[in-house]
Image (spheres, rainbow, N blue to C red):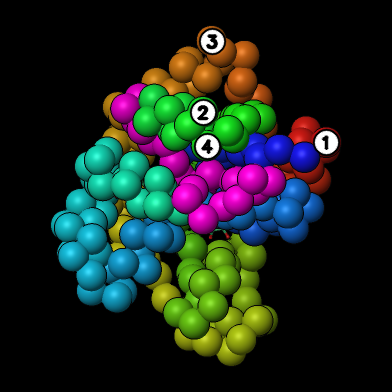
């Protein structure tokens, strides 16, 4: 078996993180979420975190070079048979080209790009209701996927919090940034015959099952 990669592409709130959680085991994937990596750096107060926070809090993208550096570092630990699941990366044409170069240098085949499709109004509904566990990172939604006890994680009992960039005005900015800087990747991968559209507006279990089917 050789190393390969799958990209989850989609607007904020399309369900990239939720789907990654659902399919990770089925594909034995190494989940590479640039958003999670940046949030960890922010939490740890590293120089990367301080740089990233100034962009993330405004709903803007972190510079391409910074992102490519952290992804390169992650790829260097993968091994010859790794299966990567990219979530929230690439997000610009420069990142997509940088990823192409990294994958070919490390002998990793890009298997497919799954575009998770949701209407913008649904993104807003999902993001305003999203809650995350401070301790284990589990992801909930106050209406769609509620925890058994409000504010408490079902998995580890940790406290649930709302991301700073999940405030309505920042969500609208992130959706605008997606249209301006990321949506162009749909044509980029479509022209290369690598894009598959997945309707991500239905229930979580149905979308997870559909993705697993597509990956087989
Ligand atoms: P990042 O963390 O990547 O955020 P995002 O792309 O905006 O995506 P989200 O995490 O908000 O949404 P998602 O699609 O994962 O949805 P989720 O599954 O959580 O990036 C954050 C910031 O970091 C960026 O703004 C940027 O500043 C920076 N950054 C990151 N990567 C970068 C890069 N490559 N380049 C430059 N900057 C970068 O679902 C949302 C909610 O909906 C949840 O509550 C969930 O429970 C619910 N839900 C999901 N699916 C369903 C369903 N099927 N049914 C019902 N509810 C559902």
Decide: few, some or many residues near mark 3? Use Cα within 10 Å; few <14, some 14-19, many ≥20. Answer: few
Q: Quadrant of residue 36?
A: bottom left
Give the crowd class for mark 2: few <14, some 14-19, many >=20 residues within 10 Å. Answer: few
Q: Earlier in the sequence, mark 3 or mark 2?
A: 2
Specify start and end residues of the magenta stretch as a single range: 75-95
Do residues under tags 3 and 1 come within 8 Å of each other at their CB atoms? no
Quick one: label 3 or label 1, which is nearer the N terminus?
A: 3
Q: Residue at x 65, y 25 (%)?
A: 196
Side of 78 relative to 172 (left or right): right
Find out if the beta carbon at label 1 lies less than 8 Å from the nearest ligand 1 atom.
no
Which is nearer the eye, 39 or 99? 99
Question: Dot 4 corresponds to which residue?
Answer: 106
Q: Which quarter of the rendering shows the N terminus?
A: top right
Disc 2 and disc 4 in contact, CB within 8 angstroms: yes
Residue 171 visible within the image: yes
Tag 1's secondary structure? loop
Q: Secondary structure at mark 4?
A: loop
């Amino acid at each position: 078996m050789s190393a390969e990669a799958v990209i989850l592409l989609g607007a904020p709130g399309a369900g990239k993180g939720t789907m990654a959680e659902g399919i990770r085991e089925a594909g034995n994937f190494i989940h590479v979420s640039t958003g999670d990596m940046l949030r960890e750096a922010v939490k740890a107060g590293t120089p990367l975190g301080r740089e990233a926070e100034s962009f993330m809090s405004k709903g803007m993208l972190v510079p391409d070079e910074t992102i490519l550096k952290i992804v390169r570092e992650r790829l260097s630990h993968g091994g010859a048979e790794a299966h990567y699941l990219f979530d929230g990366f690439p997000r610009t044409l420069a990142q997509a080209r940088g990823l192409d170069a990294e994958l070919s240098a490390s002998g990793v085949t890009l298997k497919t790009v799954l575009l998770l499709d949701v209407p913008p109004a649904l993104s807003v509904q999902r993001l305003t209701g999203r809650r995350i566990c401070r301790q284990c990172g589990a992801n909930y939604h106050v209406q769609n996927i509620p925890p058994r006890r409000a504010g408490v994680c079902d998995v580890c009992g940790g406290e649930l919090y709302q991301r700073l960039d999940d405030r309505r005005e920042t969500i609208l900015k992130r959706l605008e940034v997606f249209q301006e800087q990321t949506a162009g990747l749909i044509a980029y991968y479509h022209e290369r015959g690598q894009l598959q559209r997945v309707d991500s507006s239905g229930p979580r279990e149905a979308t997870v099952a559909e993705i697993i089917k597509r990956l087989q």
